[in-house]
Amino acid sequence: MTRSPSVVSRRITGTIFFSESIFSAALIATVTLLSVNASLLSGTDTLAGLPTTLGLVGRATLAVPMGWLMDRSGRRTGMVLGYSMGVLGMVTGILAVQTFSFVLLCVSTAIIGVNNATSQQARFVAAEVWPPHQRARIIGFIVFAGTVGAVGGPLLVAPTSALAVQLGFEPNAGPYLLGVGLLAISALTVMVFLRPDPLRFGKQFDTPSLDAEGNELASRPMRAIFANHTVQLAVASMVVGQLVMTLIMVITPVHMHHANHSNGEISLVFMAHTLGMFGFAFLTGWLIGQLGALPMIAFGAAVLVISSVMVAVAANLLALVVALFLLGLGWSFCFVAGSSLLTSALHPTERGRVQGANDTLVALASGAGSLSTGAIFASGGMIAIGAVGLGITLVFVAAAAWLNQQRRLPAVEAR
């Protein structure tokens, strides 16, 4: 008996949600102790951020090749390879902690960054097996999977560290031991249940691009794709949202430490931020389906403006909680809506490599935000951080208005 597309779509989406949930738990569990491990293994706090930067480099460098592989060999092949690389990265992390090798720790984060590049494609893979009007909701649903890691990852650090000691390992190897098991489960789950391949199955939901004679067009070159104003707007919304979010998020603990806030208060602020990022992503996807991607990008920019102003003037813990929650929510609006808009602008055979290029730009935005925020904070405190965040967002608003106008011109001229 032939199964209906909705049954297959639900199975594929559920498979990706499950695999991404446990991937996020494994990733955040290791990230929780990453700077501590870096400081211990290198012998200096100065290099504490280097492994994180190398993880971003790995993610940015391999995002386009992984996207190309997914377009050529299928989504399942790319995702299984990505999770398998994650297992290798976790094993390398165990070796790094056991042998007290800072070099191996850096290699581990770079390899895990490759897995992260694949993970960033998951929301697009799930979306392409649904009709266009449902894709925003599905993208939000997959982004929501990050909530599992945001909540569960840190909670797993203590018990896995205790388990590591019982097994004869260093305590800080615990999260990596957990990661090996979880990512192996992710790889196996995708290998078994991500069938038929979403690349092939999803083509039934897209209208082929045709030329004047009615022949299906081949995939466009990257230059032509990125010359499209819709693609430019979609990518800009994700890049700017990521840049502003990273700029403010990374430095907030330092600001709170200088203001004599406790670790518990810092954790509370980050819990609120994470809730804003992931906790409402499913609702964000639904709102995009109701209102459209462009209004939600506009709402996201407005929320980032409010957050930037609040961060600059926040005088107490409650104000910081609200500001960081709004920062995460503004990122979620821009990220989910931009992802939906980008998916709608691409042919199935173009998606992997273009979405990979997009993820490279997003990763570079993360790197730029994390590398520059310290210098900006040193020059003018949180007022300078808020001002830069506000300025970047306002420039994006002006650019987005122009791009949207350019998108509409062909339709107007055709009338």
Image (cartoon, rainbow, N blue to C red):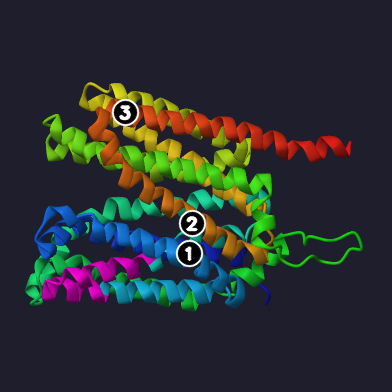
Q: Which residue is mark 3?
A: 384
Which residue is the site of mark 2? 359
Disc 2 crowd rating (10 Å Cα; few below 14, some 14-19, many 20+) is: many
| Gap between marks 3 and 1 measured at Cα | 32 Å
Quarter of the image for the C terminus: give it.
top right
**As drawn, is 220 to the left or to the right of 161?**
right
Q: Nearer the viewer, residue 166 or 70?
A: 70
Mark 2 and mark 1 lie on one chain; the one further toward the N terminus is: 1
Callouts 2 and 1 close, C-beta under 8 Å: yes
Towards the viewer: 225 or 245: 225
Q: Amino acid at mark 2?
A: Asp
Is 102 part of what is drawn in magenta?
yes
Give the residue drawn at x 49%, y 34%.
300
Camera-nearest label, 3 or 1: 3
Provide the secondary structure element on which disc 2 rests.
helix
Tell me the amino acid under the disc marked 3.
Ala
Label 3 crowd (10 A; few <14 / some 14-19 / many >=20): some
Q: Is residue 163 visible?
A: yes
Question: What's the residue at 32%, 31% (across, down)?
Answer: 385
Segment tinted magenta in the rendering:
91-113
The residue labelled by disc 1 is 63
Horizontal side of 317 relative to 350 (left or right) equals left
Q: Nearer the viewer, mark 3 or mark 2?
A: 3
